[in-house]
Amino acid sequence: MKHYLIKKETKIISIKYEDLSGLSFKPTTDIFVDDGVLVKKIVIFKPLFIELVLKKKIKNKLNLYLSLLLEDIDDDGDEKHRDLYQDVLRYKDLVLKRYGKYLDKDYLSMLLTKISIIQNELEANFYYMEEETKTR
């Protein structure tokens, strides 16, 4: 059991780490400074900051999916499309199960709609590629 004692002015405050619920994630960069601290895990507890971090992560991921989708439209890589489609489905599950409790209902609904649009576009590409291979 981890707990921390914090001295604030003349008071000593005990914080039990396990009792706090927050969003934990690993930093994306492994920058090491000679006299610095190597961070392996970050836990955010403030709800407003959790929402800001999640919205930034979600925006970056959706932009990545859109750029991959636009890039793959020009290619005939059936395997790339299937991998991207599976990744979008996994991301949708991640959003629902892990991020859903931190985001407000309106934003979550809008986000799921955007993911569904990407998913539908990939399904349409599958249909287009199947029709194209039948005509050859």
Image: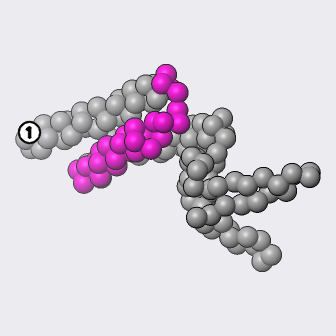
Q: Residue at x 35, y 29 (%)?
A: 117
Q: Main secondary structure of the magenta part?
A: helix
The answer to whether residue 105 is magenta is yes
Query: In front: 47, or 89?
Result: 47
Residue 50, given in percent of the width and then of the height, sits at 61, 41
Residue 123, given in percent of the width and then of the height, sits at 24, 36
Asked whether residue 48 appears in the rendered view, the answer is yes
Answer with left or right where residue 96 lies relative to residue 75: right
Q: Is residue 136 above or below residue 36?
A: above
Answer with left or right where residue 22 lies relative to residue 117: right
Query: In front: 46, or 52?
Result: 46
Task: Say which residue label 1 marks.
Answer: 135
Q: Residue 79's quadrant in the figure?
A: bottom left
Quadrant, the N terminus: bottom right
Q: Secondary structure at mark 1?
A: helix
Asked whether residue 52 appears in the rendered view, the answer is no
Q: Residue at x 86, y 51 (%)?
A: 11
Quadrant, the C terminus: top left
Query: In front: 98, or 117?
Result: 98
Q: Residue at x 48, y 24 (%)?
A: 105
The answer to whether residue 109 is magenta is no
Residue 112, given in percent of the width and then of the height, sits at 40, 30
Q: Residue at x 52, y 32 (%)?
A: 103
Q: Which residues are magenta?
A: 78-107
| Residue type, numbered disc 1 | Thr
User: In the current view of this chain or complex, which residue is farthest to the top?
Assistant: 106
User: In the current view of this chain or complex, which residue is farthest to the right?
Assistant: 9
